[in-house]
Amino acid sequence: MWARLVGTPEPWLLLAGPRVRWSLAALAPGGGRMEEPGPGSLEVGDAPPAAKRRRLLAGEEKRPGRGERYVPPPRKRNPGVSFSETHFAETHYYFEGGLRKVRPYHFDFQTYCKGRWVGKSLLHVFSTEFRAQPIDYYRAAASAGRLRLNEQPVQDLGIVLKNNDFLRNTMHRHEPPVTAQPIRILVENDEVVVVDKPSSLPVHPCGRFRHNTVIFILGKEHNLKELHTIHRLDRMTSGVLIFAKTAEVSKRIDEQIRQRQLEKEYVCRVLGEFPENEVTCEEPILVVSYKVGVCRVDPKGKSCKTVFQRLSYNGKTSVVKCFPYTGRTHQIRVHLQFLGYPIVNDPIYNMEAWGPTKGKGGEINKTNEELLRALVEEHRSKQSLSILDISEEDLKPIVGSEECDRSGYCTKPVEIMSISTDSRRTEVSKDQKEAEILACSPNSDTRPETHEANPEGASSSGNQAGANPEGASSSGNQAGHTEEKDPLCEECKIVRQDPSPRELVMYLHALRYKGAEFEYNSKMPDWALEDWDES
C-alpha cells in the first residue's frame, strides 16, 4: 500500500529522472509541488497504478510543454453498453396514420480523434470527411456552442487535433417513422424474452434509428432492459426475435449458434411459380456495400446454404418456406433473387436496377458502383429513398454531391459518429468502436431547458429530454404534438411524405427458432395465408 506523499518523495519516485519527477509534480493539485494532505491531495491508494508508474519511469508519460494544448487521458470504457431511463427520456413517441413516430430531439454524437486525424485541423477533417454540410454549417455550429473538444466549446475550427482528443457534436436528430404495429411478447421468463418483431423496426440503434428500435421500445414500453441480443433480423424482416436476460444464457445459446445447432424456419412470398420440389441453393454471397446494405452472389463471397419448400401458389405469387443453414447477410433474399423468384416487395433485390432479369442466375452486368448508383436512382425516382435508410454522407459518394443536393434528400445535419449498438454488445467497425454512447446532458449551459406541450389524449409514451440548444423554437404538427425547430437543422425545413404502413412491410417472416432446449414459434402472417387477397 502506498503511503501519503507528504514532503518526502516515495522511493520509486527518487529512482526517476528529473523529467519524470516534473511530470508527476505537474499532476499534483498544487501544479508544481506535492500538497499537504487535504481536499484533493493524494491519499493512501491514490498513487499511480503500476502500468502508469512504469511509463513514468521510462519517460513515456509526458506533460505538454509551455504553450501546448493539454489533452486529458481517454475515459474508461464500459465494455457493455446498457441503456437507462436517461436515454429513454430523450424524446417520446406518437402515433399517426398507422405509423410510430419519434419527436425530433437533440442528441450528442461523440468520438475520439481517429489516428488519421492527428496533426490535422478540425476544418480539414470536416471539409474532407464530413461533407454532408458546407463548412459554414460547422462554423455556425461552433458559434452556437454545438461543437466541443474535450468538453470545451470549439472557438476556432483551425485547432489542430491531437491523439485522445474527444469530440462532441450536438445534433437535432430526426428518426424515420416505422409501423405502428405493436411488438408482441411471445415468451418471457427468467432467462429469455422472445418477441414477434414487426417489419420496418431495427433490432438495435443504428444509422438514423435510435428510439424507433426494438431495444428502445421494449425498454420504454415494457420495462425490459439490459437485454442481450442472441440473433438479429433485418430491419424489414418480421418474426421471432430472441433476447437473453443474462450473459450466461446468452453464451449458452451463442454456443448453439456457433455449433449450427439452431434450426431456423422462415416464410416468404415470392414472384412467380416456385418449383414444387425442394430446392437447395449454396451460392456464395459477397457484401457489395455495408453502408447501403446490398449483397450479391459472387464466387469470392462466403459459403452458405438455404433450402426452400413451396407451400402454395395463387397464379401470381408463391408462398415458400426457407431453412437457412448459415447466417449470411440477406442470405434468403439473395438466394431467392439468384433463383429467379425474388420476394414480392423486396426494396433491394426485386428492383429493375439489377437488370432485365433482376439478377437471376447472378446475371447483373454492372460493377458494384454502377449497381449501387442504379439502386439509389431507382428509389429516388420513386421517392422511396427512406426505405434504404442511407445517410446523406453515404449517399453523396454514390450519386455525386450536386445530384444529391438537387434531390432534396441529402439535407440532414452531419453526424460525427454513426453509432450501431444493442443493449449489451456492439458489432461495429474499427472506427465505430471508438464511439461511446453517453447520455445527453440536459443541464449543459448551451442547451437551456424547454418544455413540451403534450395535449391531453395524445397517444405517446416516454418523455422528452427537455433540452435543446439555444435558438431552437417549437411549432405544432397535424397531430397536435409540439415539434422543435432548430435554426441549424436543414431537416426541420423540409416536409417529407410519410411512407404508407403497407410500404413498411416486406414479405419475409421468421416463423420458428429451435435450439437444443427450446422452440419458439410465431403465427403465420396474413400475407402468407393461402386465401390472402393481394389487392
Image (cartoon, rainbow, N blue to C red):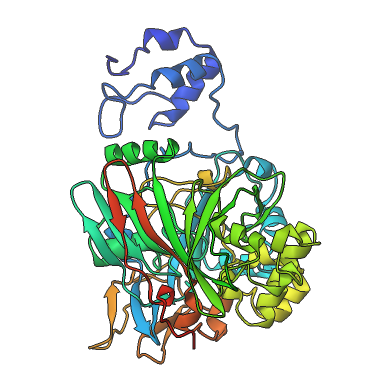
Instruction: Judge whether residue 404 can be spotted in this image.
Output: yes
Residue 406 placement, left or right of 315: right
Residue 195 x, y percent position in the rendering? 30, 61
Q: Position of residue 475 (x, y in %)?
A: 42, 88
Viewer-proximal residue, 77 or 410?
410
Q: Viewed as shown, does residue 58 lie left or right of 95?
A: right
Q: Residue at x 62, y 54 (%)?
A: 290
Front-most of residues 479 and 118: 479
Q: Can residue 168 be seen from the camera position used here?
A: no
Q: Nearer the viewer, residue 47 or 419?
A: 419
Image quadrant containing the N terminus: top left
User: Residue sitting at 60 percent across and 34 percent down?
Assistant: 66
Q: Nearer the viewer, residue 122 or 22?
A: 122
Question: Measured along the vertical axis of the image, is residue 416 above or below residue 475?
Answer: above
Give the percent coordinates (x, y) of residue 189.
18, 51
At which x and y percent is residue 24? Answer: 45, 23
Please give the name of the residue rendered at 36% of the width and 69% of the height, measured from the top-left corner: 524
Q: Is residue 249 left or right of residue 311?
A: left
Residue 411, compared with residue 281, is above or below; it is: below
- Pick out the residue farthest to the left: 190
Quarter where residue 223 is shown: bottom left
